[in-house]
Amino acid sequence: MDHSGPTREGGELALALTVNGEARRLTLPPNVTLLEVLRDRLGLTGTKKGCDHGQCGACTVRVDGQAMNACLRLAVMCEGQEVTTVEGLASEVGLHPVQRAFLEHDAYQCGFCTPGQMMSASALLEDERIGSDDAAVREAMSGNICRCGAYKNILEAIHTAREELASQRKEGGIS
């Protein structure tokens, strides 16, 4: 993919990015957020609009593997990057270990924060700098608010997903 940056077309910018493995080309105003593009232009409504200030984590997606708030990131900043939403977390073989663990541990109640929680959890599980103890996981997840208070179950789900991912790596199932 060309990384030369967005190009101007009138008052709008032409943008190329990859969303959930699919190359996308869009023309949009320079002030449109990634959240708006995902929900309103691409119909990927799993990413939730919560506070619009980057404080709740409901809009968390992964950009080039790193968790970030889609409400705070301008879409044009994602030129040439890989964006993964909760819709892209599963693969053709099934649910991601984080998704399975959230179901197994009932790590949701109303479900509004769940997509953002899952995206943050999947990113932290791939970051070798983050410890596996409860305190390290809680710190890494601190940008995601669950108004229903399912934190205990979310923590258990993350530990279960970590074990499954470690087992898959050991068996050579994933890298």
Image (cartoon, rainbow, N blue to C red):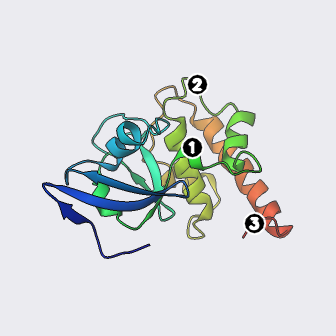
Measured as percent of width and height from the top left, residue 150 is found at: 58, 31
22 in relation to 154, above or below: below
Q: Quadrant of the C terminus?
A: bottom right
Residues under labels 3 and 2: Cα distance? 30 Å
Identify which residue is drawn at 58% across, 49% down: 88
160 in relation to 50, above or below: below
- Local SS, label 3: loop
- Local SS, label 1: helix
156 in relation to 149, above or below: below
- Mark 3 or mark 2, earlier in chain: 2
Identify which residue is drawn at 37% across, 49% down: 70
**Left or right, 90 with reference to 142:** right
Disc 2 marks which amino acid? Gln
Residue 109, which numbered label?
2
Identify which residue is drawn at 37% across, 35% down: 49
Residues under labels 3 and 1: Cα distance? 20 Å
Q: Which residue is mark 3?
A: 174
Q: Which residue is mark 1?
A: 87
83 in relation to 157, above or below: below
